[in-house]
Amino acid sequence: MAGVNKVIILGNLGADPELRSSPSGITTCRLSIATSMNWTDKNSGEKKEKTEWHRIVFFGRSAEVLDQYVKKGQQLYVEGRLQTNKYEKDGIERYSTDIIGESFNFISGSGSGSSNNNQFQEDMNQDTNNNKKKESNTDDFEDDIPF
């Protein structure tokens, strides 16, 4: 049976990103993002708010870009998937659920890191142009598709 494991988060970073590299050379970036829900209590009429914290992990180039361009307080849109890991601590089995980030977008005009958006766009455009140059050397298989 097929399933869908998709998470969409739009919230504010609670801390600066944590960039790490493993001994095997894999770069990871850990983020902590807060989302809030507001409502009015029907009985008392009091306004209430509940904040949820989400742990998000990005890998590779995305991890490096996030570390360079986002800061605590900045608003970020993230798409990814849930992943639960089992580990043992003090002889007790425990579980940890993270969001594995697959894509992100900066939300302009918010947070202290938003001034970096223009530089980020220039860097990403340069990366995209370099990738297009590499891709232009590949064969075009569209004519070979039989349908």
Image (cartoon, helix red, strand yellow):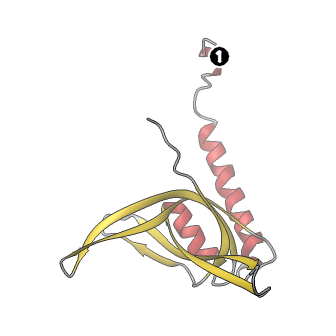
Q: Residue at x 46, y 66 (%)?
A: 98
Looking at the image, which is closer to me, 41 or 119? 41
39 relative to 138, above or below: below
Q: Residue at x 59, y 34 (%)?
A: 137
Dot 1 amino acid type: Asp
41 relative to 57, above or below: below
Q: Position of residue 96 (x, y in %)?
A: 38, 70
Helix, strand or loop under label 1: helix
Q: Residue at x 73, y 78 (%)?
A: 38
* Location of the C terminus (image quadrant): top right
For the view shown, which residue lies furthest in the front direction?
A: 43
Q: Position of residue 125 (x, y in %)?
A: 72, 57
Q: How many marks?
A: 1
88 relative to 81, above or below: below
Q: Position of residue 79 (x, y in %)?
A: 61, 58
**Left or right: where does residue 22 sit relative to residue 58?**
left
Looking at the image, which is closer to me, 133 or 44? 44
- Is residue 112 visible in the rendered structure shown here? no
Q: Quadrant of residue 27?
A: bottom left
Q: Residue at x 60, y 16 (%)?
A: 145
Q: Position of residue 52 (x, y in %)?
A: 59, 76
Residue carrying label 1: 143
- Is residue 10 visible in the rendered structure shown here? yes
Looking at the image, which is closer to me, 47 or 53? 47
Looking at the image, which is closer to me, 35 or 66? 35
* Location of the N terminus (image quadrant): top left
**Left or right: where does residue 99 sit relative to residue 43?**
left
